[in-house]
Amino acid sequence: NAGVMQNPRHLVRRRGQEARLRCSPMKGHSHVYWYRQLPEEGLKFMVYLQKENIIDESGMPKERFSAEFPKEGPSILRIQQVVRGDSAAYFCASSGWDSSTDTQYFGPGTRLTVL
Amino acid sequence: GQQVMQIPQYQHVQEGEDFTTYCNSSTTLSNIQWYKQRPGGHPVFLIQLVKSGEVKKQKRLTFQFGEAKKNSSLHITATQTTDVGTYFCAGLSGGSYIPTFGRGTSLIVHP
């Protein structure tokens, strides 16, 4: 039973380019969460999605960032026109049907470096 | 909004010494979860506490949830070098589905 998968594991972009991060939840999970982690910092919630629905995007910057979880395929976090401050580790986590009590299982993360 | 404070930020110990990290929430929690993140790795779920005053043990790790469900602790007995990493608590308030993570406590174990 595969765990949460994220790709790419490392992504290097120049300022102004787009970054596209993918997350495939654990089999049977329908809830996906995206977090950002800066060095020496905790995890900052960005967005919570279910299939075809954004449930809570209160932690996501209003500009340049977007997320989706289509009916088929992985969840995608898209960052347009990246800036140096976007450099961070981006983790996605998935949980089962009861998002208020179910454990979140984290993927290995995507380390984004903006040159 | 809800805040979760975690102390200390760093803890250096000699192998064999005990270690404790504390987590305090500004609001009453419905449950609290603990995660461990190895250097360069991703958070790995350790345990979830739900009941007031709950105590759970995993080998050398002891987890406690306060009576008021606003604080929690993780205690490691006789640390080993394999315990190195950052330990995060994450609290959920009633009705919420987004856990609030503490900043984590980084444990460094010297052999």
Image (cartoon, grey):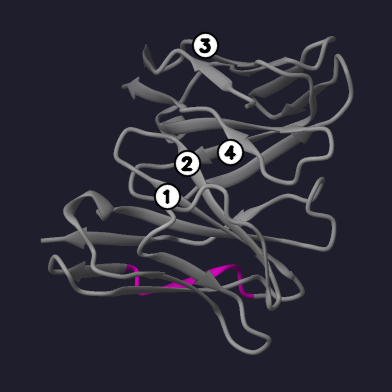
Which image quadrant for residue A48? bottom right
Q: Residue at x 40, y 18 (%)?
A: B9
User: The residue marked by circle 4 belongs to what chain?
Assistant: B
Q: Are marks 2 and 1 in contact (CB under 8 Å)?
A: yes
Dominant secondary structure, magenta: loop
Q: Nearer the viewer, mark 4 or mark 2?
A: 2
Query: Do dots 2 and 3 share one subunit?
Result: no
User: The residue marked by circle 3 belongs to what chain?
Assistant: B
Which image quadrant for residue A25? bottom right
Which residue lies under the disc numbered 4? B35
Q: Which image quarter holds the C terminus of chain A?
A: bottom left
Q: CA distance from mark 3 to mark 1?
A: 31 Å
| x, y percent for residue B1 | 62, 27
Query: Do dots 4 and 3 share one subunit?
Result: yes
The amino acid marked with disc number 2 is Leu
Which residue lies under the disc numbered 2? A43
Specify start and end residues of the magenta stretch as a single range.
A2-9
Give B104 or A2, whichever is nearer the viewer: B104
Which residue lies under the disc numbered 3? B18
Instruction: Report the residue that reaches farthest toward the front.
Output: A63
Q: Residue at x 52, y 11 (%)?
A: B18
